Image (tube, grey):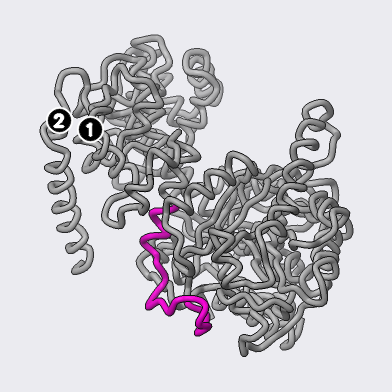
Amino acid sequence: MTERVLEKLSILSDAAKYDVSCASSGSVRKNTPGGMGNATGMGICHSYTADGRCVSLLKILLTNHCIYDCAYCVSRKSNDVKRAAFTVQEVVDLTVEFYRRNYIEGLFLSSGIFRDADYTMERLVRIARDLRQIHRFNGYIHLKAIPGASEELLHEAGMYADRLSVNLEIPSEMSLKKVAPEKNYASVYKPMNYLKESITEYKAEKKVSKKAPLFVPGGQSTQLVVGATEENDFQIMKLAGNLYDEQKLRRVYYSGYVPVSNDPRVPALGSAPLIRENRLYQADWLLRFYGFTVDELLSEDYPDLDLDLDPKMRYALRHPGEFPVDINRDPYSRILRVPGIGVKSAKKIIRARKFGKIRMEQLRKLGIAWNRAQYFLTDGGVPARLLEKDPALVEGRFLSLKGRTDQLKLFA
Amino acid sequence: MQYRYDGTYEGLLTVIFDSYANRRRATSITTDSPEVQLALSSCRTTTDKSKADRVLKKMKEICGKKVSLFFFKNFLSEKEEREMNIYRFIQRVIRENKNVLGDFRDPLIVEMQRTIKQVDREVHRMHAFVRFQETTDGKYMALIRPDFDVVPLIGPHFVKRYPGFEWVIYDIQRHKGIHFTEGQLVYVKGNALMKSELSHDDLTGREKAIQGLWRTYFRHVSIGERKNDRLHVQHIPKRYWPLLTEKNE
């Protein structure tokens, strides 16, 4: 490892960081005799960047040379940045040495497209193959599936990787064509579909025989860039819902657009839309873990998530008739809908009430966000406060209290 | 009655066994230390593993297997009230003769479950924040300083992950650690071989080079436009910084 690798690492981690995916969870891979590493299913963040994001994987590009010119991308052909390319061996060595020291859970390897899709994909696959076969590395590997790569290569990638992802990037095809003239949705959906079907087949096989090989056990993910084009939250969440339901994706990532470009095809934003990004993740969680549908959260009339209120709170205030929820009688699915009550708290409530009636003051101490939950609950005796009279009153009260604590935080 | 024990987990369970055997309820359970006054009614219990096992066996019969980790983690939390909490929990189980682990209406159980969550989080942090350094004597050394005494809990994770080389994880505050050598995990205490500090000369050349690469990587993955110190510190509290390679140039 030399100065040259150091410089490459600077350039190629810089270029990779705008892909926000960093999960190392959702895949279980046991260590093998004489091997190193495993994937536990939990995922571990080994460090956090100065911007507070999880560092779980060595996230780098193989190269930032690229034949494409996508306006939102820092590595676009027309952008004047330093270029570099790792060799296969350099990436393998970095991964093994970092992993051995417990810096990372594994590798997240992406790449600019050099020469053509197959040529690029072939090198990504070779790195994964060397790691698995020569080094018997059983840590986590996330590879980009390069649109346009052959099915043979995608299949081989799937035999080594824990997760594969193809990024849609721009949440509508019309906008995509404007900012990335060489791309279209069909080219992205093609590998996604192929992988979806293969994953389903291997899963079925695994059910019959434990010896069936792993094939992308962590599933597929994708990323949507938010704020670079004009799509509203309703369109974005509709797309995400479809990706979960139809494409069976495990994760959709939302990346608030960081202006990496003075390209006239994308807007010159002052700063990344971080609050909006956060609201989209909250809505995404509501879809995946809380049994909400997109149409319950957003509609043509309410096409954007509220920046002041989290989407669950907003939903509750818009549907006062569904509350209060009775913590002693209502089913889990209804308790889960109460703002301020998460999956863990809801499960605690279900467990605890088997022992007898839960009273409000006991509930307060159980670890729920009382500042939000209080308006939407009853224990059978005490009625919910304020809500049935006027949801606007609750909203006003909540926002003014929230404003006060936000201010305190600001001056703390 | 006031009980005293030797500070071990088995010692604590022995005390609880004796309190039932002698039918003398505990009003306090404390560890031996010079500062503890020899109160008249306090009796120093002799640790007896078979008594401890009987307590655990009984509890597992009523509450299921999970209860032993529930006790052990509460014990490792080193919280002042840990002994009496475990004792009170056992009292309730014996009294009602049922598994009450899930009764979150009871403040005692809420508190003990919260402790479990805290200890688990510390274990998870150690899985994340351990940084092995290759030393000139061919070992990989990691120094830690966790909030709770989690060394007894973190071994299995690292054994599964790194069975191919010799490594040590050492708690520099509690002077104890685990040493993985020749396929065996060995617990070490105040061992002369262990160091509470690693100097530049202890490290191999390759180690220094890799650390340089890791720091470079860490610097470059951050997105300047999104800088958020509050969030950063929330995820990696400052007390962990001194032992994290990437936080030290």
* Crowd tier of the residue under label 1, counting other residues whose Cα lies within 10 Å: few below 14, some 14–19, many 20 or above: some
Q: Quadrant of residue B170?
A: bottom right
Q: Quadrant of residue A383?
A: top left
Against B118, residue B193 (above or below) is: below
Q: Main secondary structure of the magenta part?
A: loop
Return the residue nearer the eye: A197 or B215.
A197
Q: Which mark is residue B45?
A: none
Q: Quadrant of the C terminus of chain B?
A: bottom right
Q: Is residue A74 visible?
A: yes
Image x and y of residue A72, in percent: 56, 74
Label 1 secondary element: helix
Residue beneath the point at 70% across and 51% down? A163
Amino acid under label 1? Pro
Left or right? Give the position of A5 relative to A393. Answer: right
Image x and y of residue A65, in percent: 73, 81
* Crowd tier of the residue under label 2, counting other residues whose Cα lies within 10 Å: few below 14, some 14–19, many 20 or above: some
Left or right? Give the position of B194 relative to A393. Answer: right
- Respond whether the residues carrying marks 2 and 1 are from the same subunit: yes
Against B229, residue A108 (above or below) is: above
Magenta stretch: give its range.
Answer: A259-280
Q: Which residue lies under the disc numbered 2?
A: A388
> Sequence order check: which comes first, mark 2 or mark 1?
1
Marks 2 and 1 sit apart, C-alpha to C-alpha, by 7 Å
Label 2 secondary element: loop
Amino acid under label 2? Glu
The verdict on residue A264 being magenta is yes
